[in-house]
Image (tube, coloured by chain):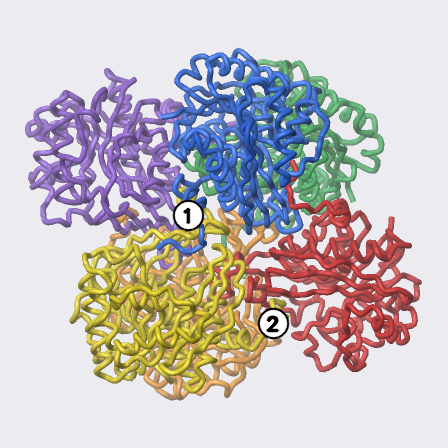
Chain colours: A yellow, B red, C blue, D green, E orange, F purple
Amino acid sequence: MNKVVAFGEIMLRLSTERHLRFSQAKAFGASYGGGEFNVCVSLANYGLNAEFVTRLPENEIGASAVKEMRKMNVASGNVVYGGERLGIYFLETGAGTRGSNVVYDRAHSSMATIEKGMIDWEKVLEGANWFHWSGITPAISQSAAEACLEAVKAAHKLGITISCDLNYRSKLWQYGKTPSEVMPELLQYSNVILGDIDTAYFMLGIPKVNPNYQDEKSLPVLYSKLFDLIPGLKIAATTLRYSVSASHQRIGGVLFDGKAIYQAAVKEVTPVVDRVGSGDAFMGGLIYGLQEYQNNNQRALDFAVAACCLKHTIAGDYNLVTLKEVENMIDGGATGLVSR
Amino acid sequence: MNKVVAFGEIMLRLSTERHLRFSQAKAFGASYGGGEFNVCVSLANYGLNAEFVTRLPENEIGASAVKEMRKMNVASGNVVYGGERLGIYFLETGAGTRGSNVVYDRAHSSMATIEKGMIDWEKVLEGANWFHWSGITPAISQSAAEACLEAVKAAHKLGITISCDLNYRSKLWQYGKTPSEVMPELLQYSNVILGDIDTAYFMLGIPKVNPNYQDEKSLPVLYSKLFDLIPGLKIAATTLRYSVSASHQRIGGVLFDGKAIYQAAVKEVTPVVDRVGSGDAFMGGLIYGLQEYQNNNQRALDFAVAACCLKHTIAGDYNLVTLKEVENMIDGGATGLVSR
Amino acid sequence: MNKVVAFGEIMLRLSTERHLRFSQAKAFGASYGGGEFNVCVSLANYGLNAEFVTRLPENEIGASAVKEMRKMNVASGNVVYGGERLGIYFLETGAGTRGSNVVYDRAHSSMATIEKGMIDWEKVLEGANWFHWSGITPAISQSAAEACLEAVKAAHKLGITISCDLNYRSKLWQYGKTPSEVMPELLQYSNVILGDIDTAYFMLGIPKVNPNYQDEKSLPVLYSKLFDLIPGLKIAATTLRYSVSASHQRIGGVLFDGKAIYQAAVKEVTPVVDRVGSGDAFMGGLIYGLQEYQNNNQRALDFAVAACCLKHTIAGDYNLVTLKEVENMIDGGATGLVSR
Amino acid sequence: MNKVVAFGEIMLRLSTERHLRFSQAKAFGASYGGGEFNVCVSLANYGLNAEFVTRLPENEIGASAVKEMRKMNVASGNVVYGGERLGIYFLETGAGTRGSNVVYDRAHSSMATIEKGMIDWEKVLEGANWFHWSGITPAISQSAAEACLEAVKAAHKLGITISCDLNYRSKLWQYGKTPSEVMPELLQYSNVILGDIDTAYFMLGIPKVNPNYQDEKSLPVLYSKLFDLIPGLKIAATTLRYSVSASHQRIGGVLFDGKAIYQAAVKEVTPVVDRVGSGDAFMGGLIYGLQEYQNNNQRALDFAVAACCLKHTIAGDYNLVTLKEVENMIDGGATGLVSR
Amino acid sequence: MNKVVAFGEIMLRLSTERHLRFSQAKAFGASYGGGEFNVCVSLANYGLNAEFVTRLPENEIGASAVKEMRKMNVASGNVVYGGERLGIYFLETGAGTRGSNVVYDRAHSSMATIEKGMIDWEKVLEGANWFHWSGITPAISQSAAEACLEAVKAAHKLGITISCDLNYRSKLWQYGKTPSEVMPELLQYSNVILGDIDTAYFMLGIPKVNPNYQDEKSLPVLYSKLFDLIPGLKIAATTLRYSVSASHQRIGGVLFDGKAIYQAAVKEVTPVVDRVGSGDAFMGGLIYGLQEYQNNNQRALDFAVAACCLKHTIAGDYNLVTLKEVENMIDGGATGLVSR
Amino acid sequence: MNKVVAFGEIMLRLSTERHLRFSQAKAFGASYGGGEFNVCVSLANYGLNAEFVTRLPENEIGASAVKEMRKMNVASGNVVYGGERLGIYFLETGAGTRGSNVVYDRAHSSMATIEKGMIDWEKVLEGANWFHWSGITPAISQSAAEACLEAVKAAHKLGITISCDLNYRSKLWQYGKTPSEVMPELLQYSNVILGDIDTAYFMLGIPKVNPNYQDEKSLPVLYSKLFDLIPGLKIAATTLRYSVSASHQRIGGVLFDGKAIYQAAVKEVTPVVDRVGSGDAFMGGLIYGLQEYQNNNQRALDFAVAACCLKHTIAGDYNLVTLKEVENMIDGGATGLVSR
């Protein structure tokens, strides 16, 4: 069975219930998540071997995060321990015209203070055929960026497919470097990139172009720039998100494999139960799809879009849906009827 | 006052809250419901005398079900006791593109092990003018099917109007018989049938025809087959459900009285608070309407459709709305404004 | 900084959770609110000095209401104490085709038994430039109406701008007087009135005209009647509410300043988290806007409409949004995206 | 089967959860209860026919109270409707050194405004062999006291056994009369009285004596005064409550039948889940015991004490225990072991 | 590292919150547990390799049970799938004089319908040095008893240490056999037995003797009977439980190793947060202690008693305490102070 | 009216409910507290003017803390803003033999990064007659210690009474200094010190003596050492805490005023609802008592002990009791009876 290793941060997520504002909350829902971990959960649910590598504090909060990893069937044997704290993010879930709001409290976390050399990547990646990272890790601290580069190089050296979700977060990147100073080297080693064209351009230091994703003629040209700059790139894809309101999204997707453009039909997503992690659900679907439907990029993309749509109906960071449920949605079975 | 007796199973319903998946739930909402009981609750709310007959275990869970019946003003004096357990169903409430999911755990229930002779129908039906059953009871076990037949025959003998909700559930019918082996005899005695044409055909062993409910010309022909096969049939009706998503339904209805076709205007139902039991709300509305608006089948149908729509806004299995609220909706008063 | 004083009743609000009906509730959410207090909260959130004057019972429930005022940064130093009880209202939150329902239990409250002379308005209004009241206070009792008149006269004497939200509630006005017997004198002193034309006509004893708010020609004529009857009137405005369902509202607004008609674009509000208090949010936005954008009535109206829209996404009686959030919405920033 | 009719007020009880103070509560647990109704629930649980007579408002809160009566198997057919509101009491549950606190909000309730003549007692009491009232009803208003007297006289005339729980509440009796002005006439007709000697003396206008309940010699003398003043008195009993803390009570009881003193062994009750209604549980146990163990006053008293002890472990106003559970406790079976 | 394999049933536990009675519950806390699984969780928490073998239905409820196993770090790789349902037990948590109550709904479960041959014990037990079972499995059905015998024989053949918790449950053993017909053969292969002397005698068909556990002289004689009947028996131990009330237990323990009697000091346990599973916590502590403190049976027993005491403070079926916490308690560190 | 200013950190407190362990929690109760703030709340409840000075981050979590201060009637006008985050502490509430556990996550908080010069103490302390700080502030960081020294010196210069709660926390003091390097200079300026003798000795660098607080002869000698080292010291007091278990504490107190020893009677505290902040409640009671009962140190001490006892019954960090409730307890009125 295929084995995917992801590297990143898992955080304690503290969310208000029932659309309450922060100042109204007498309790926060407590769960654990983070972009790269969320991808692992998706893959484990689809039946792949998934392992998550991170750094955790040696306290009860870190221990609770590990229990969540185990519950989700994500291997945690190569987690390293140390540092002061588990990163936290506070989430206030919006509705309608009021968007959701995230307050990060992740500085000084065990993962933010990770350093290269702390993980024995050769050992960790043994037997893996896929490595996944995202633009969040190099955004949290200089040393995390260095640790990420170390991991990417090790994976590249071992000939493992590397995917990256660009995941630009404007509230991060506070340590004195801009994405275009850090990301180009990291992206050199990527084979699959998820992110819209302008985010990719921005991270690579190219001027934005405001692409029209409906124009299938211009897209190959725009994407080709990425393929020019990143020698091993095989797949560039992006979620297309049209945000009607916090409770109503329209989700599509585009994929370019260096030759052809693939488009997925835009789907209505309303109401939104939980929007956070829906990009990770797309990424998880894409990694699964590219492996399982190797000669069928259209289906890989459709799988990613369907997974992303379904995620919006699931509370929490990660996508608790089965392979069968995603396939059922692609194949037209998501009728909204009660199964009984 | 009119008295309606219904026969069927009442179950413990264990539902996840706020669209959680089963594996996320640390608690299940606990309530009690079941198709035929739900009909009784509707009728009691509209002011009729309603009695529910079933078989319950002699334990605290069964006792809790009886307390719920009493609270809802449904007579429970002819419930019989015995057997091992109260049937259970688990409900995971979907949203948007993810449909709700029911896991049945009702085998070996006290009702599934009921046997004919356990209920003295002549005594039970004294003073009743209507008897209601559904296709669920004969679907759970051979002996329940036999007990149902006994009841239907007794009601028929006493000249009581008999209604049946066909209620086909693919996850039931596990005891070795198909609907078409069991239902035809039971339906012989029915005067009012709720169900779409193809379900009726299927249960009677006739090939499906995929009817067009907008085509008012073909419908009388298709319905007439039912009237041919069931000598006492007076009314055949069906809910028309167009499922946009788990959170958005469009509800209409059709009724045929052997002579004319009646159509109710399709109504938008969004969001869906709880979809389960909305068919029972239709049935309850129909039974009430056929009795109260005797010469006005259109209003009876409109009443059933409005009741069904309102049920989607009520949590739990049964329809907690008043006569006035349903009538207000038929008469155009459901404006969504705050009453104050 | 501007200081606004409002006078009215604050109540204990007991609401069912998750769209439950009253008879299903095993608990009521407990919060505190009331039309004029809600306006104060909006203003405090926007950075104005806001003070609320009312009469409270000397018990723990009254003390809890004061704690809520303090938390919301609304001055409570001139609250008077006495009487038997805090008014209560029960709220059942509807959904879709089922509207919300309010059961008032506010008779005999400390505010209902307030009498003129209990508040030293000259002292209270020192330093204030705005006084706000609503049509609810004169609707609860004869003595409250008299106390309201006393307050309005005092504010008028001091040359303070006076605003009134007409707030007609059919379930009130139970003490033997009709609005048209009481309101005309009170409205004499108002400079800003919120309410639709027909409510204003009704309260002033003029026959209803069923105005077309899209017809910008007829509106000045209709509004001028109000300006004729109320000598100091400067601004008359109304929320335009199109209620698609309890979960879907369309909100616009109209403002007339004696010369020109201003219209705000109608906005879609769906889903509705909590509809109660959205009119108060409009009022709060209007009071803020008229002060801050003094030569820009269009922006004042747009501010009021945006505030009203956002309120629908907030649980509880009052509008927990910041100045920046309302301005962001006016300026097109309410995209429903996650802020992170 | 014996039939007991009780007359009194049922209220909405709003309680803070988990020992929260009122000002901390974001929600109140909502249930329904009241002294005389609580007695009915006990009796229904023990298998007697119990009926509760009261006056309720015609709104959804009153309707919810009726649903609770039905659920508890207490007949509600002779409830009368009218008036403005259901009485409310707020409950803050103490712990250890902090006692529980009740805030009454029951003035102006439908029951407080009941008047004599509103209930047809001859019809209501048909078939009843026991009538129960308490000192709360005459404490709430003059007209309720008069309605109570009417009921007591009717019961007396019909030769029905009459019991009264003296239930002195210092926060009531606000309408201008003292207990000793009202209670003597009412108590004339009682056959069974529950209350400590000094409360009885106080209500009858006799000086307090601070009795020693361990002194079995002086007790008959003290009790005899009551028997002298109340011609039909058969049984006088009292709960003996030693309050170690809000979480730890010691419960005993004394009964005098005009001839002999009966004492029940004092039992430790810790922790206290809910202390409210434990006196009503005693009363319910006593009424049951006096009827079922007619020649065994010791067992009747033991039954009342055991019922009272068990009530302290039950959340809510009334005693949700079965006959078997109370008997099991008397017979030494309350070992605290898990039944499985 | 030592590896322990346990065999038994894991159930869905549905418990009322805050001491509510079943009929009061609007929700049930949902967790997963069962005697032998609970032992595994203890062992995993102490750092041993623990694996649980059972049979589960292939539905979402079974899948949720597996997620719980994983979260608790209990290996689930040899679980077999099939059958209809996951066993359920309902738990009503008592307080003070009211004991907790269990309603079993475990008949017809996947584990109850397990048959010998379904599990490849030779493979499962590879690498294990300890096998644990309990008297519950042979109590649920004939076929489960046979499957249990098969497992015990396989473990015996492989020379693995076998422990058994006698766990007599009077509400089980409903399939027509008595313990003394089934248990003697099963116990033949046991090396460690947990249970009081009279339960052991009863299961082996010997008359009860009502032993005095304080009398250290008579105990060896009474225990020796067990050693005579069971050839491989090395350790017999029992929890000593003195139940002051449902909220207050006193816990001690006795162990006999064929030569000497060991006694653990009795500890006060109050309040009881959750009593269920405290015997399993003792068993888990004993298995750990006997392995880790091989020449120190006193410490093994003390460890078991301390673990049992701590379990009473943990909600849910199993003992969520660390090795350090148990050792800290043995060594006198359980002072009740806040660790900060 | 007296005005007390306190300086310290307010944190977000995240606590598990109902004695759950961290890994069981799906939600954390969210409240705000901290030693010195808790003292302010006590004082505000007793009717003093209380102001809290701290440094908060400019985000929604900091804003929520300010709302809590306002609600509690604690002045917040001199709070300074800046830094990255609000400190957090996680609390797992123990029971019986399992103590509560605190996990601090307060490093890098806005208060930990406060620097001297950020607060204008001369302005802040204008009109104050009392300044309170605790040993926590100098324990969190070097710069906080310096800011604390600055404050203490300013208060001293203004002739304001200064109190200090020594509050030793072993999990703090991580920045490279020991208490005896930092505290002596800070304590120089204190007039009132709360803490046991050995903690005071330890912080002042004197060897521990393990005092016997029952021995009223040795205590003056031991306390005198403190008076020798701290020139302005007027009062040294300590809580006496005997911890039977996490749920049962015995609380007394000792006070020395340089001349006489005062002892308060030890009180039983069981059950414990929330133990955290009970020392702060003692401190608050002491500050109040020393001001209000100036010539009655015994009553001041009794007030502090009673306040401390009552705090154990209140959920959350601070003591929500009124002056009347504390006095009632001193005067013997805490009988555990229901007030109604």
Q: Nearer the viewer, mark 1 or mark 2?
A: 1
Chain name for mark 1: A
Q: Check the residue under mark 2 and report the chain it is in.
A: E
| Residue E254 position within the rendered picture, expressed as x and y whole percent measured from the top left | 35, 63
Q: Nearer the viewer, residue D39 or D221?
A: D39
Residue type at mark 2: give it. Gln
Number of marks in the image? Answer: 2
Question: Which residue is depicted at the point 78% across and 80% down?
Answer: B180
Q: Is residue C152 above or below residue B12?
A: above
Q: Is residue F188 above or below residue F271?
A: above
Residue at 69 percent across and 72 percent down: it is B169
Find residue A225 and report its horizontal and vertical position in percent.
Answer: 30, 75
Dot 2: few (<14), some (14–19), or many (≥20) neighbours within 10 Å? few
Point out the image quarter for the N terminus of chain C. Answer: top left
Using residue F52 as the reference point, say whether residue E237 is left or right of it.
right
The quarter in which the C terminus of chain C is drawn is bottom left
Q: Which mark is residue E174?
A: 2
Would residue E88 appear left or right of A92 to someone viewing this image?
Answer: right
Residue marked by disc 1: A27
Name the kind of residue labelled 1 in the image. Ala
User: Is there any visible trace of residue B29 in the rendered image?
Assistant: yes
